Amino acid sequence: MTDLASETGMRRARPLVRRLMRHRWDIRLHHEDRVCDGPLILAGNHVDVIDGPLLATLAPRPVHALTKSEMYVGKTGRFLNWAGQIPVVRHTPDARAVRMGLEVLKAGRVLGIYPEGARDNGLFDTFAHGVGYFALVSGAPVVPVISFGTKAIHLSREDAPPRGARIDMWFGEPIQFDAEMWPRRRAHVADVSDQIQEHLRTALKEAEAETGLILTDRGAA
């Protein structure tokens, strides 16, 4: 199997899934023009299981998102592979996921990543260094993606937002670093990751100010 994830299934599925999502929820996208051409990293906050499907479906360009390997079972796993998503084994270095992510960027496509590493409060309090590594190796710009409304206070972690709920997806200004060839020092990757983390936190504040929505520490908008 090639390390370049397929884009065919995603392009076929996106129009239908997008219509279904817009029929179910009141979806509002902000600053779609910031999703530029060429290799790109979309880095989003993560409070609910629906965040990934929303990003892959609603972003202006098809997205190959790093997706936890636990999802790759049965029909769900087959669909994710068909849709060009990238399985990643969490909490351990996953060389194959890294190769696939870099191949996506090398091909001029979009890589989706949730730097919090798992569903969290969406405030970027926890932050893995993977996004810094991808940004430093590829030189691709990183665009913040701030989602509101994907989680309501009364819902459990596995519930989707109720029918008719408002969901906002806000795209921030990009941050970019010069590509660095080998050797890449771990301290440099950590520094780049710290800068991206601060950029995403700033983007969250800007999104809250512009939309009037507030992301609480319980993951609700």
Image: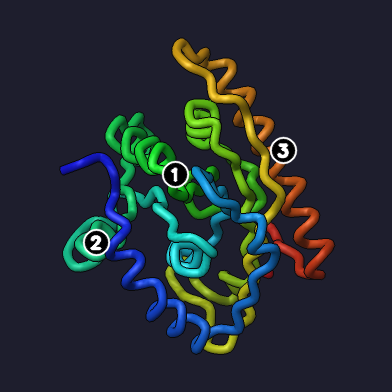
In depth, the one of 19 and 215 nearer the eye is 19
| Residue 102 visible to the viewer | yes
Q: Secondary structure at mark 2?
A: helix
Counting residues from the start of the chain, the first of labels 1 and 2 encountered is 2
Of helix, strand and loop, which one carries label 1? Answer: loop
Q: CA distance from mark 1 to mark 2?
A: 19 Å
Q: Secondary structure at mark 3?
A: helix
Q: Residue at x 65, y 43 (%)?
A: 125
Please say if 122 is above or below 214: above
Residue 14 as seen in the image, left or right of residue 167: left
Amino acid found under the numbered disc labelled 1: Gly
- Is residue 86 or residue 50 the one in the foreground? 86
* Residue for badge 3: 198
Counting other residues with Cα less than 10 Å from the Cα at mark 3, is it few (<14), some (14-19), or many (20 or more)? few
Give the alpha-carbon distance from disc 3 to disc 2, as whole Å: 34 Å
Q: Nearer the viewer, mark 1 or mark 2?
A: 1
Q: Amino acid at mark 3?
A: Glu
Q: Dividing the picture into quarters, in which one does residue 29 lie? A: bottom right
Q: Disc 1 and disc 3: Cα gap in Å?
A: 26 Å
Q: Nearer the viewer, residue 136 or 38?
A: 38
